[in-house]
């Protein structure tokens, strides 16, 4: 590849003699030429700038000087690379019809570093590494006369890209030129000793930041190398590194998590992301979901969510009017007003996506005294621990079912109950009734540490249903489905 850098400070780019880029130049993998822009001036003072039309601070670089310099440098780079093999052409070997068009014009890219350019990224570096010639025009002062980019942009033989390193201002394009040359050169074939380095690095194909790395000594400043890395277990090392990449990316670059391709995320990835508050809805990319206490102003949204999700959990034989009757008896906006207003009796937790949509909720009924039994005698006989709280509802929008939101809601419910004291003691048990036919729900409760203790009768409208009663012991330590949860942030109640 051919790279030309035009600058009024050629010495700035001396660093490109060092390290891997310097070696690539000496090995002939990279033909890098640094030019002093002042070589194209004709006046005694070698002037490259003048005052801005329209007034204002600073100086602007003249387009005529840049034009002469760029024309020369682009002309020497436009000679097509010689064909590697010249086919014999003669009577026995007639020239193929297309022979004259076989050599494509070289791809020449004029790069203008400027804080007002498009963001320079790894994807852009990969694209630029496929060009034949890069010309970097390093501006100083207030920049280069805008007609330079306009003029070369209008030319069909040159691509012009104004690029920025990031949202801050440097004094000129030279540092950006160093950055761009290094980012591109290391992608050229043969430059990196071990091309495997390109596979797992930050901003690579995985779309994640790289995992942390360690070397000897095994203990330094009292800090040990993570044990798994010395275990010799390649599978575990790979999984640990992937987990670290996911967690680090979630903490530092949420924009990158939101852009992850869901097809590249396995079950273990999703559990790790759930621990960071990220969930993958059906057919969508990861989304941030936070669990918090319900607030008075959530009542209408909760009623809507409940009316939508309750019927989905009912068995197919149930009559629509019975389901509707249950909703109007228990799940209207007015009911949620009452639940949200009575924090001693009810705990409402919501799962809210970053765009403010409620995607799930739990409603838990708390005992008002330590010995208050569950409201139904059949349940009171099955659930004997006291105080006992009832997990009355756990509902999640269908797109988020299986995403881990329900698990996080359940853990947050249990964690919040542990700090709710009734007569000086925290609830000892959390129980729930779930329709016998809803196997999916039962499996999910089992994973969350609930066990079946018997059955009860449950009225939905005029229909008497058989429910399984399941209990989770709240004093048996944490059930371990999701490691680290986004616990409920204490909201206004
Ligand atoms: Cl490419 N040039 C200058 N002058 N400042 C910058 C930049 C480039 N990228 C960020 N700041």
Image: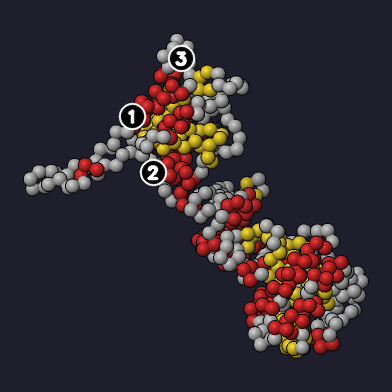
Residue 426 drawn at (x, y percent) = 85, 70
Q: Earlier in the sequence, mark 3 or mark 2?
A: 3
Residue drawn at 13 percent across, 43 percent down: 89
Q: Is residue 66 above or below residue 295?
A: above
Q: Earlier in the sequence, mark 1 or mark 3?
A: 3
Residue 129 drawn at (x, y percent) = 41, 42
Residue 75 drawn at (x, y percent) = 33, 29
Distance from label 1 to label 3 (Cα)? 23 Å
Which residue is tagged 1? Answer: 75
Dividing the picture into quadrants, the one containing residue 109 is top left
Q: Is residue 240 above or below residue 343?
A: above
Residue 381 drawn at (x, y percent) = 82, 87
Which of 464/482 is in front?
Answer: 464
Q: Earlier in the sequence, mark 1 or mark 2?
A: 1
Which residue is tagged 2? Answer: 130
Q: Residues within 10 Å of mark 2 (few under 14, many from 20)?
A: few
Dividing the picture into quadrants, the one containing residue 289 is bottom right
Which of 270/144 is in front?
Answer: 144
Ligand 1 image-quadrant field: top right
Distance from label 3 to label 2 (Cα)? 35 Å
Q: Nearer the viewer, mark 3 or mark 2?
A: 3
Secondary element under disc 3, as helix, strand or loop, is loop
Secondary element under disc 2, as helix, strand or loop, is loop
Secondary element under disc 1, as helix, strand or loop, is helix
Q: CB of residue at label 2: within 8 Å of ligand 1?
A: no
Check contact, mark 1 vs mark 2: CB within 8 A. no
Number of marks: 3
State whether residue 349 appears in this view.
no
Which residue is tagged 3? Answer: 46
């Amino acid at each position: 590849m051919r790279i030309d850098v035009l600058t009024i400070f050629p010495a700035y780019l001396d660093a490109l003699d060092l390290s891997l880029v310097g070696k690539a130049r000496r090995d002939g993998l990279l033909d890098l030429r640094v030019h002093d822009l002042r070589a194209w001036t004709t006046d005694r003072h070698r002037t490259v700038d003048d005052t801005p039309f329209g007034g204002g601070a600073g100086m602007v670089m003249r387009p005529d000087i840049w034009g002469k310099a760029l024309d020369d440098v682009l002309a020497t780079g436009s000679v097509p690379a010689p064909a590697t093999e010249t086919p014999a052409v003669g009577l026995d070997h007639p020239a193929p019809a297309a022979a004259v068009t076989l050599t494509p014009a070289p791809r020449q890219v004029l790069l203008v570093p400027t804080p007002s350019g498009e963001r320079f990224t790894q994807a852009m570096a990969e694209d630029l590494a496929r060009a034949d010639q890069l010309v970097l025009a390093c501006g100083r002062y207030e920049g280069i006369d805008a007609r330079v980019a306009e003029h070369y942009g209008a030319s069909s033989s040159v691509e012009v890209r104004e690029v920025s390193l990031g949202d801050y201002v440097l004094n000129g394009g030279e540092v950006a030129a160093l950055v761009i040359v290094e980012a591109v050169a290391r992608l050229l074939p043969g430059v990196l000793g071990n091309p495997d380095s390109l596979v797992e690095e930050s901003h690579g194909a995985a779309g994640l930041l790289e995992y942390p790395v360690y070397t000897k000594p095994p203990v330094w400043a009292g800090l040990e190398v993570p044990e798994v890395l010395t275990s010799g277990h390649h599978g575990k090392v790979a999984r640990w590194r992937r987990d670290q990449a996911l967690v680090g990316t979630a903490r530092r670059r949420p924009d990158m998590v939101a852009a992850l391709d869901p097809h590249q995320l396995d079950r273990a990835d999703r559990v790790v992301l759930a621990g960071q508050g990220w969930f993958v809805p059906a057919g969508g990319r990861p989304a941030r979901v936070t669990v918090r206490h319900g607030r008075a102003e959530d009542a209408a949204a909760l009623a809507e969510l409940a009316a939508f999700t309750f019927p989905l959990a009912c068995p197919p034989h149930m009559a629509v009017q019975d389901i509707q009757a249950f909703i109007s008896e228990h799940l209207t906006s007015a009911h949620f007003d009452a639940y949200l207003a009575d924090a001693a009796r009810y705990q409402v937790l919501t799962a809210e996506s970053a765009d403010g949509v409620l995607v799930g909720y739990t409603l838990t009924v708390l005992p008002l005294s330590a010995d208050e039994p569950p409201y139904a005698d059949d349940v009171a006989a099955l659930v004997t621990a006291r105080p006992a709280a009832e997990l009355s509802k756990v509902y999640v929008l269908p797109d988020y079912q299986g995403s881990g939101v329900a698990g996080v809601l359940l853990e947050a419910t249990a964690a919040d109950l542990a700090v709710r004291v009734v007569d000086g003691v925290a609830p000892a048990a959390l129980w729930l009734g779930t329709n016998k036919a809803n196997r999916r729900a039962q499996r999910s409760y089992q994973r969350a540490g609930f066990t079946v203790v018997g059955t009860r009768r449950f009225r939905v409208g005029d229909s008497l249903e058989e429910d399984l009663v399941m209990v989770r012991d709240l004093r048996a330590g944490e059930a371990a489905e999701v490691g680290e949860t986004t616990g409920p942030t204490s909201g206004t109640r």
